[in-house]
Amino acid sequence: MITTLLVASAAAQASTTGSVTASATEAAAAVADKAASVATKVEHAVRRGVKAAAEGVETGAKAVGRVADNVARKAGVPGAGQAASAPPR
């Protein structure tokens, strides 16, 4: 009788330990999946931000060029106000 109780108790503990280990493993996998998802979203956000910044710099540079060209034209600089020939794309 005591042997049967010990075996049943050991089996119950093994079963509980196994499910706790499985739960911990599943939880760790879920956390890893969430972290990977967040990292991907952050990467995409950074790429969008870098692209937007580059477009902003380009737009600003064009605006400065137009202003400088207008000022030079108004100051009477020869050749000012004429579009520079851009290389074909």
Image: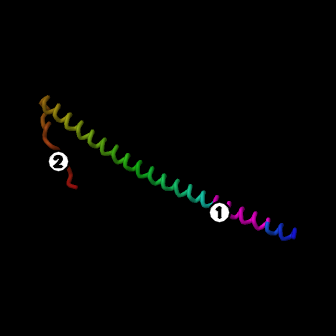
- Indicate the quadrant where residue 70 lies: top left
Picture layout, residue 17 above or below residue 58: below
- Indicate the quadrant where residue 16 lies: bottom right
Q: Which mark is residue 22?
A: 1
Q: Secondary structure at mark 2?
A: loop
Q: Which mark is residue 72?
A: none
> Do the residues under discs 2 and 1 have CB atoms within 8 angstroms?
no
Q: Secondary structure at mark 1?
A: helix
Q: Residue at x 13, y 41 (%)?
A: 82
**Camera-side residue: 23 or 3?**
3
Q: How many circles with numbers are drawn on the protein? A: 2
In this figure, which residue is indicated by the disc labeled 2? Answer: 85
Residue 69 picture location, percent across and down: 18, 36
Q: Residues within 10 Å of mark 2 (few under 14, many from 20)?
A: few
**Camera-side residue: 79 or 64?**
64
Structural distance between the alpha carbons of marks 2 and 1: 69 Å
Picture layout, residue 48 above or below residue 72: below
Q: Is residue 23 magenta?
A: yes
**Camera-side residue: 24 or 16?**
16
Residue 33 picture location, percent across and down: 53, 58
Left or right: residue 38 versus residue 9 is left
Query: Of all residues shown, which one is farthest toward the front?
Result: 1
Q: Residue at x 17, y 44 (%)?
A: 84
Q: Main secondary structure of the magenta part?
A: helix
The N terminus: image quadrant: bottom right
**Which segment is the magenta one?**
9-24
* Tag nearer the camera, 2 or 1: 1
Picture layout, residue 82 above or below residue 22: above
Q: Which of marks 1 and 2 precedes in the sequence?
A: 1
Query: Of all residues shown, which one is farthest toward the right?
Result: 2
Q: Label 1 sits on what residue type?
A: Ala
Residue 13 picture location, percent across and down: 76, 63
